[in-house]
Amino acid sequence: MKWIKDSGKEPPKSPAVARVKDDAEKHGNRLPPGQIVTDKWPVLQFSHVPRIDLAAWTFKMFGLVEEPVEFTWDEFNQLPVSTLVNDIHCVTHWSKFDNSWEGVLARDLLALVRIRPETRYVMVHGHDGYATNVPLSILTGPDSILAFRHDGKELSPEHGWPCRLIPPPDHYLWKGAKWISGLEFMAEDKAGFWERNGYHMNANPWREERFS
């Protein structure tokens, strides 16, 4: 049926648009604009899933630090383990509520390195060559974790096994690098992979900072 503009009725909404509207009304301020809620956890990445040998796995903190720090997997697993529950929001418009993460809080990890005072930003690196920029403040806060378990289960390779960064809910999930390999401390902000390819430098879901 051809829609007649002057019929006095609103045109029918697509199912996707209707779902966004329904979820926004149901979840209120908990759900960022333009998002829909899912119980699933879609798999998204910019390239391949790397094959990681735990015997060769390393995690480094370098850049603007008094002395670089490096961990093996065994050493990393000796760090204090915390549990964090949060919501995650993907730039592709899905959100997943009440995720339980087990791992090392970012602020506990940062306490083990002497960061130089001019540091304001961090480049998060992955073993697959991925990188993304975040402000230092989100890693020193209480809501960022380097997770190795989700909802009581070990991360799958597709979701970042053996360890990935989970940022606070006020950042889209692309800021949480999978297969994390290190933190590079910087004085000035610098674009990571998706930021160089048109994504926003800040990535706040409530401001819909999807693209630059």
Image: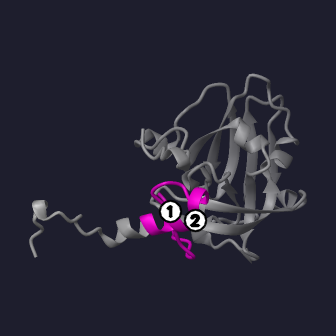
SS at circle 1: helix
Specify the segment rendered in magenta. Answer: 21-46
Residue 19 vs 125, above or below: the answer is below
Q: Amino acid at mark 1?
A: Ala
Task: Name the residue that disc number 1 marks.
Answer: 24
Q: Give left or right: position of 33 versus 179.
A: left
Amino acid carrying mark 2 in the image: His
- Residue 17 seen anywhere in this rendered image of the structure: yes
Closest to the observer, 35 or 21:
21
The quadrant the N terminus occupies is bottom left
- The residue under label 2 is 27
- Where is residue 101, by image quadrant? bottom right
Residue 28 in which image quadrant = bottom right
- The location of residue 121, given as percent across then percent down, is 66, 33
Disc 2 and disc 1 in contact, CB within 8 angstroms = yes
Q: Which element carries disc 2, helix, strand or loop? A: helix
Mark 2–mark 1 distance (CA, rounded to whole Å)? 6 Å
